[in-house]
Amino acid sequence: MASIMIMVLAVIYPFIPVVEPSGDLLKLECEPAVGIAAHTTVITCHFRGYKDVKVDAVSLRKVGQNEPTFRHRIAKQQKLGDPRFSLENPAEGPSLKINDTMFSDTGVFDYEIVTNRGRASAKFTLSVTAKYKDPIVSTWPQDVTEGGPIDLYCNATEGYPTGTIHWFDRYGTNWTINSILTKTTKDTDSSKSVALSSKLTFNSIDLSLAPFRCIVLNSKYIKDGEKTIQITPAKQDAEDMAESKSNNTNIIAGVMVIGSLIAGLLFALFFFRRGKEQRYESGQPA
Ligand SMILES: *[C@@H]1O[C@H](CO)[C@@H](O)[C@H](O)[C@H]1NC(C)=O
Ligand SMILES: *[C@@H]1O[C@H](CO)[C@@H](O)[C@H](O)[C@H]1NC(C)=O
């Protein structure tokens, strides 16, 4: 019995009219925005309920502050407040734009608009991130020997929020699990940043795995940067290589000397025989 009821409901449910909010209500909606410090941020907003909405005036206020951050009366071309803020395109709609985004812009905003269709308001959040600078890599000790110990460092600074660093060898093997990540956070009123330092330690390095690569990922695991670490073998190894090279040169020189001796000998033999033949030929009566 119950199952029949459920089936009947399932069949008629799609036909139950959805209760719409009263049609003549203008609505404003804004998407949460993520800005990049020192870059331009666009806060995407749009109207619901009407198509032909004309913006007359806007007022933006950060929650917790008394004064509006930014106000704009379109017809009067009157703008007040922080000059970094503007309407992205007043003719197109209510989206906002912030030039030179700052960490201090982080927060929740109240956005009020007066239009030809009445008033509307919305809240949105803005968070600010910063891209990590190109990583700086180093090795310790600087001179490494095959099978010896080595620490590889990969440092990336000035990013926000906290990201991470991953390690790979030349074959793409993931060595991250053997590394230690140190994070140092700087947080002042106007700026926030994290310095990342990752140390990958080998007690006994296999130099055929080099070069290594470190990849800096932001808080969303998107790549901000990467660097390749070349590992130069220490002097002893370098000398060994140079020696084997000079040995090769000696061998080549030896082969060349012996080669030219043989060639000389063959020449001598050839001329000797030709001389004999000529003498024999000239001895023949014409
Ligand atoms: C990277 O950071 C570590 C730890 O702070 C430091 O010991 C190392 O010298 C730094 N390397 C470079 C190249 O800055
Ligand atoms: C590498 O290893 C780390 C730590 O184990 C892991 O979080 C990461 O997803 C791995 N990356 C790839 C590309 O496999």
Image: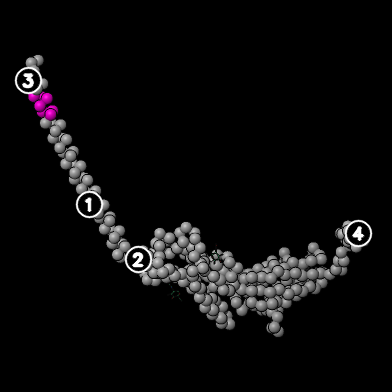
The reply, left or right, for residue 201 in relation to residue 31 is: left
Reading the chain from its start, which is encountered first: label 1 or label 3?
1
Q: Label 1 vs label 4: CA separation? A: 97 Å
Q: Label 3 vs label 2: CA separation? A: 76 Å
**Is residue 186 magenta-colored?**
no
Residue topped by disc 3: 283
Residue topped by disc 4: 4
Residue topped by disc 1: 250
x and y, in percent, of residue 79 in the image: 68, 75
Residue topped by disc 2: 145
Q: Are marks 1 and 3 in contact (CB under 8 Å)?
A: no
Ligand 1's image quarter is bottom left
Reading the chain from its start, which is encountered first: label 3 or label 4?
4
Image quadrant in which the N terminus is located: bottom right
Q: Nearer the viewer, mark 2 or mark 4?
A: 4
Res. 31 in view: yes
The stretch of residues the image draws in magenta is: 273-279
Q: Nearer the viewer, mark 1 or mark 4?
A: 4
How crowded pointer 3 is (Cα within 10 Å; few <14, some 14-19, many 20+) is rated as few
Q: Nearer the viewer, mark 1 or mark 3?
A: 1
Reading the chain from its start, which is encountered first: label 1 or label 2?
2
**Is residue 275 magenta-colored?**
yes
Image quadrant in which the C terminus is located: top left
Within 8 Å: ligand 1 and the Cβ of disc 1? no
